[in-house]
Amino acid sequence: MVTIIADEGKNQIGADLYQGFISKGVQAEYISLEHVEVKPCVSCGGCTYKTYGKCTVRDDGDFIYPKVIRSDVIIFVSPITFGSYSFKLKRVFDKFALIMDRHYFVEKKELVKGGKLGSKFKFFAIGDKENCIEEEITAFQNLFHENLVITKGIGNSYITEKSLSEGMRNQIIEEVRSA
């Protein structure tokens, strides 16, 4: 199962990618954050130590995390915002501690969260570079790489502008299928 979590506004990159997966017979789910309020992580430690696996901050995004747990692959679609994901998508990612091993440890001189419980964390991101400068694109790619290191994940990031070309869509689908 592939889960696409998108904060994409009018560009519909995630919706287009979702249709591409469906047309190739890949089981996929599309979650738009357009009308979803995800409150920020408050670093209370609840999900790690008090109420393991459950966030103490209730919000509209509570339905997302069970879907992520059941997914084989997660794909973020976001405008590149100051070299990062959109604030809504960043809030979703910050709460991924809910689905990761609760123990941190050092691996290759990096602080690592421990990865997705029960399987390899497969993570991809598509950044919409509309209205970005080159340094923001580089920062986005570096952030994504660090996210893979911290989560012990595998995956790739892609940069697009306003829409996916058919070639890029097919490349993403094939790479995700082989992950």
Image (cartoon, grey):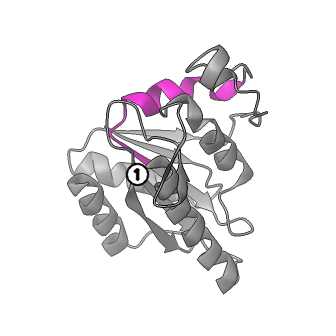
| Residue 63 colored in magenta in the image | yes
Q: Examine the rendering and report whether any part of residue 33 can be seen.
A: no
In the rendered image, residue 142, in percent from the top left (x then y), is placed at 57, 70
Identify whether 68 is placed above or below 140. Answer: above
In the rendered image, residue 129, in percent from the top left (x then y), is placed at 62, 74
Q: What span is colored magenta in the figure?
A: 59-74
Q: Is residue 13 left or right of residue 134?
A: left
In the rendered image, residue 72, in percent from the top left (x then y), is placed at 32, 39
| Residue 87 colored in magenta in the image | no
17 or 129: nearer the eye?
129
Provide the residue designation for mark 1.
153
Give the crowd class for mark 1: few <14, some 14-19, many >=20 residues within 10 Å: many
Q: Is residue 146 left or right of residue 57?
A: left
77 or 72: nearer the eye?
72
In the rendered image, residue 99, in percent from the top left (x then y), is placed at 49, 31
Residue lying at 69% horizontally and 36% vertically, measured from the top left? 35
Secondary structure mostly seen in magenta is helix
Secondary structure category for the residue under label 1: loop
Identify whether 138 is placed above or below 118. Answer: below
Q: Amino acid at mark 1?
A: Gly
Residue found at the far bottom of this picture:
134
68 or 147: nearer the eye?
147
4 or 48: nearer the eye?
48
Q: Could you say which quadrant of the image residue 136 lies in?
A: bottom right
Q: Examine the rendering and report whether any part of residue 137 can be seen.
A: yes
